[in-house]
Amino acid sequence: MNVGSKALDKTLVASPERQQEADSDWAVVQQVQAGDLPAFDKLILKYRERVYGVIYNMTSNREDAADLTQDAFIKAFQSIHRFQGQSSFFTWLYRIAVNSTLTHLRKARLRTFFSFEKINEEDKTAEIISILTDKSGGDRELFVKELQEKLNEAMQKLSIKHRTVVTLFEIDGLSHEEIAEVMDCSVGTVRSRLHYAKQLLQAELQAYTRL
Amino acid sequence: MNDHQRSSKTVTLEDLLRIKRAERPPAEFWASFEKSLRAKQLAAIVEKRPWWYSWRPVFRWSVPAGAVAAVAVTVLSLRSGGGLAEAPQTGREIATAIPVQSEPASLERVALQPETAVAPASSFDAPRHAAEPVVVAAAESVQSSAPAAVVPAERTPSGALASVSEQISGVAVASVQTSPVSVTTAATESEMRPGADFGAFFERAVAHLDEGFRTMKQPSSEPLAQLTTPKDARRARLLAFGSSVDANSPMYSNASNVLRSRERITSHLNDEALYDSIRRLGVKGNGVSIQF
């Protein structure tokens, strides 16, 4: 497990660790603000996979996701002197990334070209894929590819905002409060969007959940 | 986990989304990612964006809109409040008009302007005559056969100017009977420039005239200076008639002949003064003669 996935696991645990993480990030940010520019690489290394994951699941295009992730880090680097530590660094970075992606998606709404990443079959994921393959009774590799396409299609049928909420909550593991902060809306709005998005996804993917 | 257990387990939506979470790029992807990120980072450091870069989308629409608004405001201000901007020029105009009183030809040049109303200072009412030229004159000026000063009303900034003009007219009348007191000498070059402090200029001008009035009061008591010719008396009578006719008054609204005669009188007075001044000047040998 690399640094990015470790960080991803950390986001799913309770808030004291998140607070500790925010404190360590703030220390690094202060170093960068003091002129130690290479210190920013630590932040890139720590968050690049998570940021890429969020953007990838919002765009369903790996090339766009790579470009937008780089742009998000560049924007964060350019405006890091304005970061005052009022929120955690990762919330601030996520906000930059999500806003850039939303702008990109609004511009390229008509373009529906998807490119997939390979599924990293770890413990739990491998088990789920095995269950689904067994139930369908087909070739595992073909089934995984088809499942990926169906999942992306279902995600793309959601509106941009609903997709963002689902991505941040279900895939990246942020809390409702953190999503509200990133998306600059109320927690109630986040819950409402999440509920609605899940209903739509459930309807779209019922062929797999009923297997 | 055996096959039976697997088949009995249900897959939830969260499980499917967990598969999405497992979609990750390979390790080599991060090598190229870091390379291009480094290049972008260097470019960002070298090419520092200007401060207005983030305002680009706003500027795209606001600059043309702002330019249109600025033009509109300029046009409106020129139409409605143009006099305020030209207030110092009004002061200069008054300043040049006052010494002219001792030079009838110059005075007539001012009086010959179209839409010129002649009114005594007692009937001076700035708001009522806002659309007409303001005539700075006094009852005594009728006797001295010269209106004191004529200032176009559309250049009059406010009622404050009217009161200042009244003060000046009182002082200026006295100066008519003696040698002229140039208000322009009271004003420095900087005050005469457009945009200079108009109030300060007037204060200085009034103070200077007042001083001149006090010093020149003495000669006016001479018997010759107090003499008025029959021509002057006639002119004063006509001027009094002309000034007493108010074109806006309901009494004269239908009396077109009265208004016409007022215009004729005014024109006659102007022409008379003009020719009078020309008649007085003459050439005799190598010199210029002035007839008194």
Image: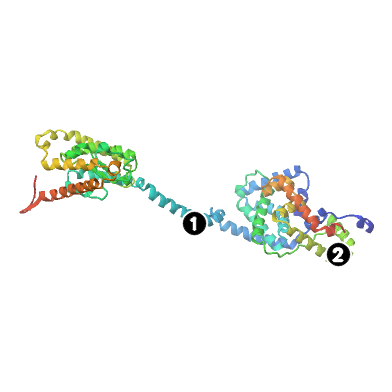
- The residue at which mark 2 appears reads as A140
Chain letter behind tag 1:
B
Q: Please give the name of the residue rendered at 67% of the width and 51% of the height, measured from the top-left corner.
A: A95
Would residue A110 be found to the left or right of residue B198 on screen? right
Q: Give how far apart the Cα atoms at labels 2 and 1 are.
A: 61 Å
| Camera-nearest residue between B202 and A23 | B202
Q: Amino acid at mark 2?
A: Arg
Q: Secondary structure at mark 2?
A: helix
- The residue at which mark 1 appears reads as B64
Would residue B288 be found to the left or right of residue B241 on screen? left
Residue B273 point in image, percent of width and height: 16, 47
Is residue B171 placed above or below A109 in the rendered structure?
above
Would residue A49 be found to the left or right of residue B156 on screen? right
Q: Secondary structure at mark 1?
A: helix
Crowd rating for badge 2 (residues with CA inside 10 Å; few <14, some 14–19, many 20+): some
- Image quadrant in which you'd find residue B229: top left
- Image quadrant in which you'd find residue A72: bottom right
Residue A196 point in image, percent of width and height: 75, 51
Q: Please give the name of the residue rendered at 87% of the width and 60% of the height, measured from the top-left corner.
A: A132
Q: Are marks 2 and 1 in contact (CB under 8 Å)?
A: no
Chain letter behind tag 2:
A
Which quadrant does the N terminus of chain B fall into? bottom right
